[in-house]
Structures are given as C-alpha cells and as structure tokens.
Image (cartoon, rainbow, N blue to C red):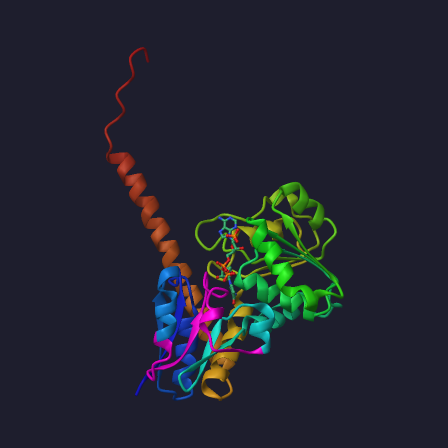
Amino acid sequence: MTRRVVLIGHPVAHSLSGPMLQAAFDERGIDARHELRDVSIPGLPAAIEDVRGTDHLGAQVTIPHKERVVPLIDRLTDEAHATGAVNTITKEGKRLVGHNTDVPGFRVALDSLVGRQKMPKMAVVLGAGGGARAVVYGLITEGFQRVVVFNRHLHRGEGLVRHFGRSAAHMELKAMPWHESIIEAELARTRVLVNATSIGLHGDVAPIPAGIIPPGLLVMDLIYNPSQTRFLREAAAAGAEATANGLVMLLHQGTAQFELWTGQPAPIEIMRERLEAALAAREASADDAASEAAAGVAAAAEAAPAPTPAPGD
Ligand code: NDP
C-alpha cells in the first residue's frame, strides 16, 4: 500500500517540502506519497485524527498550527516538549509522536550563517510563533547569552519567554513590545537578527524598516520562497556581514523528518538539488505571472478611452 505523508498547514501552497521529500522517497524506493493538506484552525483536530489511519506514514505540521497541535499528540520528544511546538508526526501503531526537527534544521542554518567565526552571544528574533520557538531554543542551546524577542502581539512573546523559563535561566531572554525605536536600540547592540514572522511570505514587504538595520549583522529570514525577501535585500543593502534565507533550515529539518519516518539515511544531495530546482521553477513562474500582469495593465491602459476633461480643465 502506498502510504501518505501529509503536510498540514494554512497556507501550504508556498511549501517546497513536497518535491524535496518525494524525491527522497523515490530515491530510496519507499512507497510513499507526499500530499498537501490546507487545514484551517477548526479543521486541525480532524486532520490530525486522520493521521492515525494505517494509510498514513506520518505528517508535517506547519504555519500556523505548530503550537496548537501539541495537545492533539500522544507523546512528545524532548525537543518538541522543550519548544512547545511540533513540526513532525511519526506513528507508534495508532499513537502519534510529536517531534521538532526545526531545531536541528535551524542549528545547521545558524552554523552556516556564522561560518568559521566564534558563535555570537546576542540575537534579536522577530516573531513568536512555532518557527520562532525552534529558533529561540536553538539559540539557548547554542550558548547565546542575550536573546530579545519582538512580536506584534506582545503577550505571545511573553508566553514564549515564560515557556522557556527554566531552560533559559542562565541567560537573558526577554520579550519586548514591537516599537521601531525599541527594536532599533536592540539591533544596535546585537549580532544576529532572525525574521521568524511570516511577513514577506506574501508580497514584497518587510517586518521592519530598512533604516533601522545597522551594518555588520548576521541576518537570517526563515522564509525561503521567495528566496530573496525584501527583509534580506534591505539587510544586505544596509551592510549585513552575511544573510541567509530559510532554505538550509528547510533542507535539514526535512532530512531529519525523512530519517524519522523511514529509519533510512536521507539522500541529502538529491533533496538539496530537488529543492533548489523547485524554488527556481516557482520563482520563474512568479516572474512570468508578474510580467503578464504588468503587460495586461499596460494593454488595458492603451485600450482605455482618453479621460474626459473635467469641467474647467
Ligand atoms: P506562526 O503562524 O506560528 O507565527 C507567525 C508569526 O508571524 C507570529 O509571530 C505572528 O505574529 C507573525 N506575523 C504574521 N503576520 C504578521 C503581521 N502582518 N504583522 C506582524 N507580525 C505578523 O508561523 P510559524 O512560526 O510556523 O512560521 C513563521 C514563518 O517562518 C513562516 O513564513 C514559515 O514559512 C517560516 N518557517 C520556515 C522554516 C524553514 O524551515 N525555513 C521552519 C519554520 C517556519 P502574531 O503572534 O502577533 O500574530
């Protein structure tokens, strides 16, 4: 029987997990099919219940459900428990086990952003959702000494800080209100800046104004599609020492998922190639759509009758 691996989220259309994981299943001869399942918040319990069926090998959980799914799972691994967020579900018979492979994915991405220099100690994280929890946990366990979280809804940032209470007891972990002047002051003393909001996933918008980003930072955007968000472009233009999108994190959280579901080593090079090809194809079709839309606007303007002069013109 072909078994399913479903990606449960809302939205899901931007995701590149499908091509990456399907290529890995095919390469290793595993009879599994990746499927996207767009699930709204009220539909989440039923979608998770479906995963218990024998036709499911497991599931991925993405935006905005990573925290909400926790009470629907039977057992959590240490990292899922520590973060309070689940991005991967495996099965023990009908029982569901929640994992968080975003954490190892983020660690690899951070190491690659930092390169050969010493691991920095201070970071600013924008966002306090499921992805931000993996980022903050990764920073805590990498030995960061000061991490400041800014979130549109302050209470969610404060909830994140409370959640990490004991594991962050040795360092300074704070949630601060989303005010430009406060973010600017914090950026002036930090070294690493991570966008873990979904701002930039749809539309060419950035979470913070370009003018408050100082030069010399190590900057990561968890978003990978588009590959160059406005945030990353503006950080680079401001003189960032290095920038990275979320592709490395996506790849490495995906290889960890593959190994959990199949017990086999992930074909990482095949997955990387497929991911990069899928991203290039999506970006090319987005460019085509944008050119077609622009051509349509120009043609409509040419075909439109000249405006009637207003009285008095
Ligand atoms: P959640 O829905 O859990 O969190 C979304 C976050 O974005 C919250 O902090 C939310 O703030 C903030 N946000 C959304 N819209 C706005 C807005 N208009 N203005 C200000 N803040 C906003 O999503 P996730 O944490 O799961 O994902 C966040 C992003 O990270 C997504 O783009 C996702 O694709 C990406 N991601 C990438 C990964 C990778 O492997 N590369 C892994 C994990 C995530 P508030 O709480 O105030 O609503």
Task: Inspect this view and state whether residue 245 appears.
Answer: no
Task: Inspect this view and state whether residue 250 appears.
Answer: yes
Q: Position of residue 192 (x, y in %)?
A: 68, 58
Quadrant holding the N terminus: bottom left
x 59%, y 74%: residue: 79
Compared across the picture, whether 55 is left or right of 263 comes to: left
Quarter location, residue 92: bottom left
Q: Which residue is nearer to you in this view: 7 or 71?
A: 71
Quadrant holding the C terminus: top left
Span colored in magenta: 50-77
Q: Residue furthest top?
A: 312
Q: Is residue 109 above or below residue 214?
A: below
Q: Position of residue 206 (x, y in %)?
A: 53, 48
Q: Which residue is nearer to you in this view: 142 or 244?
A: 142
x 26%, y 21%: residue: 308
Number of numbered discs: 0
Q: Position of residue 169 (x, y in %)?
A: 73, 65
- Indicate whether residue 275 is drawn in magenta: no
Compared across the picture, whether 120 is left or right of 40 comes to: right
Compared across the picture, whether 184 is left or right of 298 comes to: right
Q: Which residue is nearer to you in this view: 295 or 74?
A: 74
- Indicate whether residue 58 is drawn in magenta: yes
Q: Position of residue 180 (x, y in %)?
A: 63, 42
x 60%, y 65%: residue: 135
